Image (cartoon, rainbow, N blue to C red):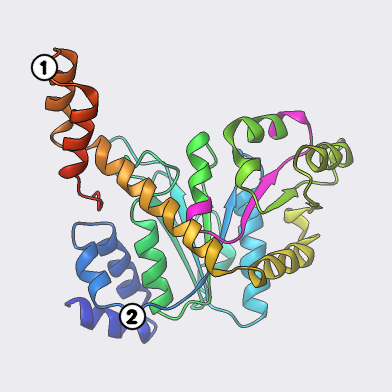
Amino acid sequence: MDIHELLTAARAGSQRATGRLLSLVESDRRDDVLAVLQSRPVRTVGITGPPGAGKSTTVAVLVAAYRARGLRVAVLAVDPSSPYSGGALLGDRIRMAAHINDPGVLIRSVATRGHLGGLSAAVPAAIRLLAALSYDIVVLETVGVGQSEVEIAAVADPTVAILNPGAGDAVQAAKAGLLEVADIIVVNKADREGADQTVRDLHIETGMPVLKIIAAENTGIDDLVGAIDAHHRTDDPRRRAARARLQILSLAQSALRTHPGLAELSAAVAGGDLDVYTATARLLDGVQVTPE
């Protein structure tokens, strides 16, 4: 099927057609798909945090809460790329088995494919596609490793940082820059010792309210959904423009690092044949801002 046929099938409920379209936006045919999509807003909720914090469990109960409202939900789980195949290391459906057979839920793993930031270069296109397919909510879960996770703020509103009780997660999150971009901070597994102290420490560190949940028991999820709704209602054109700016800068940085002329320019600067300012200008003159 061509792209128009795939779109027709996906809108009729074909998960297979939707999967093929998502594969296309991860390929060199991304622009072909985007060219036929009409712009439509869609709520995008980012979930990030250190490994083991309970992000996937939290996503699963959030999905259930949104489905109870009758909303169609898409989950994009951004995983590290396989060093062999370039595909996602973590399976699409293993983590959220309760929603496998729900036609109103799409779960998709997206490999970072060498993109330096925490988000795949295909994520903005995937979100636009899912919006065009009339999904109401896109939940974006990142793997939670390294400073690159702050890029989630470029596409999500709000960004929810999931942490566990104890000083370790809070310190790691602060070092990774997660607390700087988080709109909502959540302490999961709040029945564990030290949860109240962690909440107090995070509140002092950020000045923000900190929610407590026990995702595995579906405790505190209504409060989290309410906080997400409240934050979304405060969105405005200035914040949307700031997120768009971050997306452009992220993709441009990837394009610069993979530009075919970079090695030659670097050699010229290292050999003293070219100054770094001229080399930078030449690099910018030839850059393409849609990395594959």
The number of callouts visible is: 2
Magenta part of the protein: which range?
153-169
- N-term-proximal mark, 2 vs 1: 2
The image shows residue 191 at horizontal and vertical percentages of 85, 46
Where on the picture, by quarter, is residue 283?
top left
Q: Which mark is residue 273?
A: 1
Is residue 49 visible from the viewing direction of this image? Answer: no
In magenta segment, residue 239 = no
Q: Position of residue 112 (x, y in %)?
A: 37, 45
Residue bearing mark 2: 38
Residue 158 is covered by the magenta coloring = yes
Taking depth in this image into account, of 43 and 56 the one nearest to the observer is: 43
Name the one closer to the observer, 24 or 209: 209
Local SS, label 1: loop
| Above/below status of 158 relative to 102 | above
Looking at the image, is mark 2 or mark 1 nearer the viewer?
A: 1
Q: Nearer the viewer, residue 24 or 288?
A: 288
Q: Position of residue 159 (x, y in %)?
A: 60, 54
Q: Are marks 2 and 1 in contact (CB under 8 Å)?
A: no
Residue 247 screen position, x and y as percent: 41, 53
Amino acid type, callout 1: Asp
Is 142 placed above or below 15 here?
above
Q: Which residue is at 22% across, 41% downward?
A: 284
Q: Which mark is residue 70?
A: none
The quadrant of the image that shows the N terminus is bottom left
Which of the pair 269/51 is nearer the observer?
269
Mark 2 residue type: Gln
- Residue at horizontal 79%, vertical 38%? 165
Relative placement, left or right, of 22 versus 102 is: left
Q: Is residue 199 visible?
A: yes
